[in-house]
Image: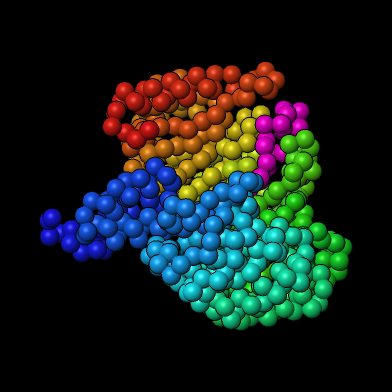
Amino acid sequence: MHICLLPTEILLRIFTINIPESNIWIIPVLRAPLAVLAGTCRKFKEPALDILWGRIIGFKPLISCLPEGVCNRDRRGKLTLQRPLLAGEWRLIHQYARRVRSFAVNGSQLDMIDNHVMQAFMSAPSSLFPNLRRLCWHDDREHFFPLLCTLLRPTITSIQANFISASPTFAQSALFASLGSLCPSTQELGVALCIGDSAESSDAICKALCSLRELSHLETGALNRREFLRLASLPPPKSLYFRMGTYDTHEMQSNSTTTIFSQLDQVNLTASSPSVIEHFLRSVRLPSCRSAQVCLDHDNLQYNPEILYNILHIPDLIVSLSECLSPALEKLHIEFESDFRYIREDIDRNYVLGFDAVAPLLPFNRLTDLRLDWMCTSGVNDASIKILAQSWPQLEQFYFRGTACWAVPPSMTFTALVHLIQHCPRLHDVQITFCATPVDYDNDPFFFETVPNEKITTLSVGMSPISDPCTVVYILLRLLPKLGYVDSFGWFHDDPPTPPPFEPLVDGWIAVNEILKVKNPRRLK
């Protein structure tokens, strides 16, 4: 073996090169090669097994390690034990379980084991996963809580416990209240439940949060205003994800008290309508927030889009964000969890937003990532996009319209793209809808003196009308010499006839990609 492969750290790096670190488990197609490496030689065995067992889902992998005849399936198809485990069998399980760093389990996987298996793991002679760092428990049945408690250890730094409950039960509150003593090193905590209807339950959960001194990321279920204010009084984490509960907007307006999160670095909030978020943010200040994500989610939007996308509320929503957030903001996403294929042309023009709707965001000159891709920005023209680009010179990712099938043609042209490239040199990810109609830039200093952007290899244009694909490719490659692919989408086949000027859209952008492929086959698709 080459001397460079002797250090274990190098082998670990090589073995994990195709395994995303963010994944909670390793897909089967990657597990097979790791098993082969573990049996190749003694030097490969330990690092390969560490990776293979580092992230597992469910208890089945541990049970599969037992000798034949110890484990079986009962009449219901559940995994069961024929007898209690012996000391040698526990050592065999520990040989692999000590390597587990991330463990996840859901209801269907818990249904695979019977009481014998559960009782055996609960009475293990030593901690089942002594080096566990990340625990994901996706089941709210309380008779499994004793098994869950046996997994909670001081080594854990990340917990996801998704209890699908509108209000926590006593058992859930008691379990949550014990986290401070069982897992004091927790840095990330996700619990899909509310703080609690009763004052006693709320107190227990809030005290549990106070005991997690290293907590930096908190994700909760639905919070009403009172619960949110209660959180604001605690030592705040740096990152907060939560869903807004049902609010009485009149009560919120009458309460003029401003809540300040002075240490919050990142916030992600979800609500059912822009007006709920708008009223909520009016009384909140986030002076240190660098990342904000607002998600508007409504189950019935596909049948009645006016419920969620109300033109009267969108500008107010943006104003409330601009007042709540600090100019230090670097990332802002406003997203709709919805299907806009159902929006029709007869209501599209009521949704058009212009420059004035976006103008409150101009002071945020540190923005590097801005996503407003669901907005119908057909009222924003080339001159307006120039002002926006000059105000956000640090932009690296910019999504501006392009996700929804708005039937109103955009006002922006190629000139808008030139402005972005001129004033935002760091851009590498762009989604923008514009009229890709060739413009005569011959001998125009504005065009030829623009420094090309070589970071952009893929351009998303949504439903951008197009004509003369050959000339469009010439202009694009002059501005984006490394461009290899243009991502677009057309009118859906099950929709009414394509309105003008969108008829040639699909064929036009297909032609653009074919020409790009010929111009330089090495460009990334």
x then y, percent, for residue 191: 65, 64
In this picture, residue 234 sits left or right of residue 8: right
Q: Relative to 426, is 238 on the left or the right?
A: right
* Rendered residue at 74%/44% (across/down): 299
Taking the spot 86% from the left edge, 66% from the top edge, the residue there is: 251
Tell me which segment is drawn in magenta.
Answer: 333-355
Residue 477 image point, x, y percent: 35, 32
Q: Is residue 396 above or below residue 115?
A: above
Q: Residue at x 74, y 60 (%)?
A: 165
On the image, the x and y values in percent for residue 376 come to 65, 39
Name the image quarter holding residue 5.
bottom left
Image quadrant in which the C terminus is located? top left
Above or below — where is 258 with respect to 417? below
Q: Inspect the magenta stretch and tell me whether residue 353 lies in it.
A: yes
How far across and down, in percent of the image, does residue 310 sit? 76, 44
Residue 22: image quadrant is: bottom left
Residue 281 visible in rendering? no
The N terminus: image quadrant: bottom left
